[in-house]
């Protein structure tokens, strides 16, 4: 069995209504003034968190809201606030977009490295400020992962910073904060979390510890996503998705994702397709490309998604992919690249950009060439 290192927040709290407990954690660290990085639709839902901070004597300073997937420029606009306002901790409350900005601000404020210097794996030397994260989508799992993603506008590519210093000190996963997520965002974010689990289970560096999270995440999300999309007030479905998303996030550090995410990044970088939707569009096509490398793993994925095993591994794997396509359709997610007005002649450039995401492609079960990437985009078109 391969050795594996698990790096997780020192405190992970899960449960309805747990978010305000973050105030107690921050005061325990001696924090006096916290920078809150959030997004516009989330701020009105934070009354109880703000009250808890106030009662604990922690002053809240709000960063400009992160209302779309963050660019380098958006991050660089938030960074100076730390020194201007003298904050001594960062609280990211939102989807992956707000949380990723919070993580990088906590790491890079007042430091000696610029964000351009830390894109990649293990290039970040330290994190200067305490960091607490509270997800309001289910979701990226960014509240527990060592990753943060920014769009580098200069080359229209989403770039990742991966570092143990980006693992937050504490994560509070409160499913009640996800009740206000609109159906389309519930669908996209849920499919992202599901993709984290699938890509970590069917991965060159898969590991039995992470398999446990991944399989349980797949079961929870597959059984509950359509319910939450159709009825956002279904608290059981919301809690199941929040848990599935947390499991997906716990897969990201030790194993991480693979070619689905690598090929999805150019859709976000150049055409601003939401992260979860980009993954959903490519998922069936990349999985079919990968089947031959590990039919048994994809048959296990199918079983976790709810397929009744009957026939060969390859047969089960194909049924799993059909179930995924149905799930995504039932959630109202468009199925083709052409649905997003992406010109067909952009495919070669997208394939070229995807090939640069080597930090994820190296995890893919089957080696993937630029010509393969073109074929996959064509199949998804
Ligand atoms: N750091 C990681 O480990 C990691 C993993 C996967 C993806 N990501 C990145 O995260 C970003 C995507 O994050 P996301 O999918 O969570 O979406 P998001 O953060 O962009 O949020 C999507 C939309 O939902 C809104 N929203 C969020 N919570 C809400 C709530 N409770 N009620 C109402 N509206 C709400 C946001 O304001 C936004 O408009 C991408 O940039 C992606 O690359 C990061
Ligand atoms: Fe993702």
Image (cartoon, rainbow, N blue to C red):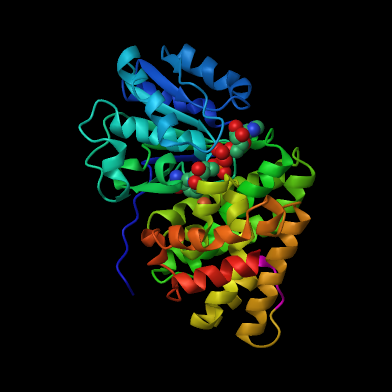
**Residue in front for this viewpoint, 57 or 330:** 330
Horizontally, residue 381 falls left or right of residue 268, namely: right
Q: Looking at the picture, how far across and down is residue 102, in whole percent?
A: 41, 32
Residue farthest along the front direction in this orientation: 345
Image quarter hosting the N terminus: bottom left
Quarter where residue 110 is shown = top left
Q: Looking at the picture, how far across and down is residue 104, in whole percent?
A: 36, 35
The structure residue drawn at horizontal position 59% and vertical position 18%, both measured from the top left corner, is 47
Magenta stretch, main secondary structure class: loop
**Residue in front for this viewpoint, 197 or 263:** 263
Question: Magenta span has 301?
Answer: no
Up-down: is 297 above or below 151? below
Up-down: is 113 above or below 373? above
**Residue in front for this viewpoint, 285 or 61:** 285
Residue 240 visible within the image: no
Horizontally, residue 104 falls left or right of residue 226, namely: left
The structure residue drawn at horizontal position 52% and vertical position 24%, both measured from the top left corner, is 65
Horizontally, residue 172 falls left or right of residue 184, namely: left
Query: Which residue range is magenta in the image?
Result: 304-308
Quarter where residue 107 is shown = top left
């Amino acid at each position: 069995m391969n050795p594996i290192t698990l790096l997780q927040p020192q405190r992970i709290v899960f449960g309805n209504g747990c978010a305000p407990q973050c105030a107690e954690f921050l005061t325990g660290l001696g924090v006096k003034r916290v920078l809150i990085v959030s997004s516009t639709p989330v701020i009105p839902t934070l009354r109880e968190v703000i009250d808890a901070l106030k009662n604990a004597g922690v002053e809240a300073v709000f960063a400009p809201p992160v209302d779309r997937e963050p660019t380098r420029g958006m991050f660089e606009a938030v960074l100076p606030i730390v020194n201007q306002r003298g904050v001594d901790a960062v609280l990211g409350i939102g989807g992956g977009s707000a949380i990723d900005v919070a993580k990088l601000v906590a790491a890079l404020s007042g430091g000696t490295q610029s964000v351009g210097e830390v894109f990649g794996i293990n290039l970040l030397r330290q994190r200067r400020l305490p960091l607490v994260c509270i997800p309001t989508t289910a979701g990226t799992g960014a509240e527990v992962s060592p990753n943060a993603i920014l769009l580098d506008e200069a080359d229209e590519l989403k770039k990742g910073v991966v570092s143990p210093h980006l693992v937050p000190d504490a994560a509070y996963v409160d499913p009640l904060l996800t009740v206000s997520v609109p159906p389309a965002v519930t669908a996209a974010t849920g499919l992202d979390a599901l993709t984290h689990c699938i890509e970590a289970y069917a991965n060159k560096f898969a590991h039995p510890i992470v398999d446990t999270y991944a399989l349980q995440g797949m079961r929870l999300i597959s059984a509950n996503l359509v319910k939450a999309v159709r009825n956002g007030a279904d608290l059981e479905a919301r809690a199941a998705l929040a848990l599935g998303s947390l499991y997906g996030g716990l897969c990201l550090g030790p194993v991480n994702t693979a070619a689905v995410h690598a090929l999805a990044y150019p859709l976000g970088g150049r055409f601003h397709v939401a992260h979860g939707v980009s993954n959903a569009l490519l998922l069936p096509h990349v999985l079919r490309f990968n089947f031959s490398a590990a039919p048994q793993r994809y048959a296990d994925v199918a079983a976790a998604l709810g397929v009744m095993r009957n026939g060969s591994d390859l047969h089960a794997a194909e049924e799993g992919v059909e179930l995924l396509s149905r799930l995504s359709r039932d959630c109202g997610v468009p199925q083709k690249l052409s649905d997003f007005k992406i010109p067909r002649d952009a495919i070669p450039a997208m394939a070229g950009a995807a090939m640069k995401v080597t930090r994820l492609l190296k995890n893919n079960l089957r080696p993937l060439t630029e010509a393969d990437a073109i074929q996959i985009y064509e199949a998804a078109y």
